[in-house]
Image (cartoon, rainbow, N blue to C red):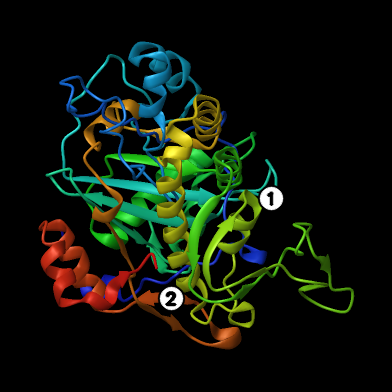
Amino acid sequence: MTSPRARRMELLVGKAGKGGRDGKVGGVGKGGTVGNAGEVGRTGKTGRRSIWSGVPRWARVCTVFGVVLMLLSGAVLVGYETLLSRYEGSVGKADLFGDKAAGAQERKSNVKGPLNILLVGIDPRDAKTPPLADSIMVMHVPASLDRAYIFSVPRDLYVEIPRFDKAGYRGGSGKINGAMSHGSIVEGRNPSAAQGFELLAKTVQKATGIDRFDAGAIINFTGFQKIVDAMGGVDMYVEREVRSEHREPNGKHRKGNPYGEGYIGPQAVYKKGNQHLSGWQALDYVRQRYPKNGVPDGDYGRQRHQQQFIKAMVGQAFSADVVTNPIKLDRVIRAAGQSLTFNGRGNSVVDFAIALKGIRSENVKLIKLPGEGIGTGSGYRGERLLPVADDFFTALGKEQLDAFLLEHPELRNKAK
């Protein structure tokens, strides 16, 4: 894997669209899930296998994310084969990589590491508007399949976007979040987020030196709101007080400013400390990115909050309150199935869930890739990653991330 510094210095972090919105999946057909099924327990004192003891606390193909989610628990309710037909059938599938392997032709359980999984959140304005990649995350799982590393690719990252004949795009330079938009164009039809994902994947590969993604998911953040509500809310740590740009305390959208840009009226406030957030509150919190609202590091802060939210949401999904309540669990699984569109390049959601069953939340590391702006004010062109990112990608390719993070602890994003 290569990551030449000359090329790396062209990278920039991307902002998508106004309002800093993260989320919904559009133009991909039925929503899907990058699911995780878990293991069916270890042997207990009675000599019988506990159906819950092996349930992973972290939902594995996560993005923005958490993408491998909740499917194992469903096996406890209805049995493995029934699980496949009932839940896997509801997962949205699409040819996200252009290799026509949206689903497996036959049952497989041969997922092997190391793995690189691309997770993309989009929030299209309408079906006719080409989607922008509002959130771009990569989950790396080493060959041991017992831990994971999640890093965010800045949306404003200024990169070279390759030629893409399917969409009639000749190639060029720009913010990385626009790659999905360029690639989504389909003559005579509405834009295709799945086709746009293909070009975005190629662009991320070129920017990071990753040779190939083993799976991918388009994530519907509004669907994640439904998952959180199905769970009864999510407990997460708010690192500092944040005031909403978009929502009032009661959840209603703030009114537009009649005298200029932005919004007016009361703002929802997220206090520092441990908080229990409803679906709309959690989604609103992770969308905030302006220093004036309490996020001094802008989009980098939002990336961190998204990673923290995913980890908290997955932990909540596997809490006793959910997994021991069949009715609530069923609601959560169904909501997950409507929120994600998944491609495992020949392997199913359940295959990945089984392969990643050993991952626990304490073995998931959240990574920040530092960057800086190119240009200022009206001359701002985007972001570029700092040289240490080259070393990170090299370490990723050589399976040396643990040693690298010991040398660079400042790149670790903490959940609390």
What x and y, as percent, mark residue 231?
54, 40
Circle 1: residue type: Arg
Q: Which residue is mark 2?
A: 383
Horizontally, is 345 left or right of 133 in the view? Answer: left
Q: Quadrant of residue 1?
A: bottom left
- Furthest-right residue in view? 258
Residue 308 is situated, as x and y percent measured from the top left of the image, at: 43, 60
Q: Is 218 positioned to the left or the right of 23 in the image?
A: left
Would residue 242 appear left or right of 45 to someone viewing this image?
A: right
Coordinates of residue 396 in the picture (x, y in percent): 18, 59
Between the residue at mark 2 and the residue at mark 1, the CA separation in whole angstroms equals 24 Å
Residue for badge 1: 125
* Nearer-N-terminus badge (2/1): 1
The residue nearer to you, when weighing 217 against 377, is: 217
In the structure shown, which secondary structural element does the residue marked by tag 1 occupy?
loop
In the image, 263 versus 216, the foreground residue is 263
Q: Secondary structure at mark 2?
A: strand
